[in-house]
Amino acid sequence: MAEGTMHNLDWLFAIGVLFFLLSAWGIGANDVANSYATSVSSRSLTLVQAGCLAVLTEFIGAIALGEKVTETIRKGVFKLDPFKDSPGTLILAMVIAEAGSAIWLTVCTRAGFPVSTTQSLVGAMVGVGIALQLHVKWGWESNSVSQIAASWGIAPIIAAGFGAIIMLSIRLLVHSRKDPLKWALRIIPFYYALTAGILALFVVMDGGHGIPSIEKMGAAKACGIVLGTFAGVLVITAIFFVPYFNAKLFKEDTRLRFWHIPMGPLLLKDNYNIYWPGKADAPVVTDYYATDYIGDKEESETDSVRKEGKDGGVTQNPATEETVQTDSAAKAQTPIDKSRQTELEAVDRLPWAHPKRMWATIKLVASHGITRDVIGHQSKGLEHIHERAPVFDNKVEHLWTTAQVCSAMIMSIAHGANDISNAIGPFTTEYVVWKSGVVNKKSDTPEWIKAVGGITLGVGFWTFGYHIMRNLGNRITKHSPTRGYSMELAAAITVLLASKFGLPVSTTQCITGAVVGVALVNWDLKSINWTQLGKIFLGWCLTVPCAGLIAGILMGIAINVPQWTHK
């Protein structure tokens, strides 16, 4: 067959571009929420902040750490040899696999099911392989269907174990102490350093993204990088962060903001001067245990306890100490919706092409996804589940917000580097085969494909990710910064070990297992929404067969379509 651009299949390549964008958008809407759901649910970040960070971190991961070489068929579900004499069929197979995966991801995201995007693509590949009567890996071997099925139990159990251990250590070393804030300030440098060290180990062991493997780097150099990162962050936290938190939480200086952290030891003085002070009437910390229930105006048991503590002069709930109560997320959204309505009414009578009306419409559409309420709920049953979670000192919780956000950002960068392959892998195959006219087992991924994929990931989270944020956060159990930190770090450790030992896991399954493990440390099984977990597990089980069924039907129709010759 002659080599060169296959212009006779331009129409098929164009369809492939559309499904590539839909697939990357779906991955962003479904999978990126794994990185930021706990941070938003625990009120360490707002949804707007998470949306902005997601666009940035996913793009950095895809461009700076994205794979240089992408396998033509993601995860090697079937071999390429049968396509050597028919490259057009390979393009068709990749387009349909991407379509099947994208369709399933979009349906799951709309329904609020956090599913594995990797397994969605593998399921679609299996469906394509069966339709083409190719040999599919069913037995127990690398990236086989049986290993994928095993991951439904392996990943959550491992992540749950690590999550429980980390949260238990924080409870024993900090929350259970007589003066938890004092002990928290003593111990927080260790946890910051531990986070940085584990994430450095994640990057070093992952390798393959412009970073030498451990074998090439050498164990001594790898250990030096990890221990150096640990020691460096430990020293930086002790010198700069501890004095800042001491002034903010013990002295209750509400003028302090994050840009005052570089002052470090200067904040230990009795009378210090700060540059660019914030408003002094701001609360010391956020109430991380404010009720999420917005169903009606009836007072929940949690609010009753808090009011009794205030009126009676006895603090029965640590969350009320030195804290200004905050409204629930949905109550906070009410003025946003009213503001939108006012803006629309103001321009409603203007012509449709008027600049003010067009700008108001664009702003409404662009901000829809990141101004949704993902914390508030209207379920009394879920509120009772939340009330069973122990309430810890808000000042102590505040110390873990920075570590939680940093771990979420690093996980998002890693996601952008790795899981973007689920979208660009098939599309790179389509592009290279369409451009060259020949089938190659490995091909370089053009930078523009990684850039488009990285941006589309962030856009997916920005516009549609709130569906997953709702169900992966407080819908399972009550979140707070120390709990969210334990969940994120446990998921990172699980992914690290899985990649080292070749265990087939997904970030979705890791973070879900970690959420359950941390919730178990509440010592109350009723503090977990088991119904919601059942729905999530059902989504995992349906992913491979449903994505495979969609892709298989489409491939079967496409490859067996009758030819019509009219004379």
Image (cartoon, rainbow, N blue to C red):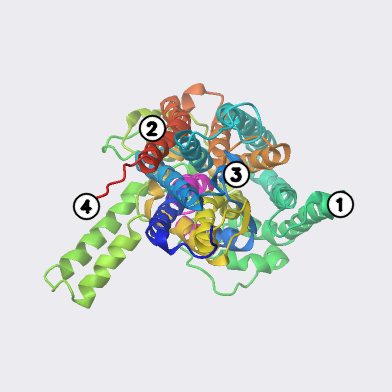
Quick one: label 2 or label 3, which is nearer the N terminus?
3
| Of pointers 1 and 3, the one earlier in the residue sequence | 3
Q: Nearer the viewer, mark 1 or mark 2?
A: 1
Q: Which amino acid does label 4 sit on?
A: Lys
Query: Could you tell me residue 293's position as x and y percent?
Result: 35, 38
Q: Earlier in the sequence, mark 1 or mark 2?
A: 1
The quadrant of the picture occupied by the N terminus is bottom right
Residue 44: in sight, yes or no?
no
Q: How crowded is mark 2: few (under 14 residues within 10 Å), some or many (20 or more)?
A: many
Position of residue 535 in the picture relative to residue 218 (left or right): left
Amino acid type for the residue under numbered disc 2? Glu
Marks 4 and 1 sit apart, C-alpha to C-alpha, by 71 Å
In this view, the residue farthest toward the front is 567
On screen, residue 244 above or below 138: below
Residue position for label 4: 567
Per the image, the residue denoted by label 1 is 218
**Magenta stretch: dominant SS?**
helix
Segment colored magenta: 28-55
Q: Is label 1 or label 3 in front?
A: 3
Q: In this view, does 76 lie above or below 366?
A: above
Q: Position of residue 519 (x, y in %)?
A: 54, 31
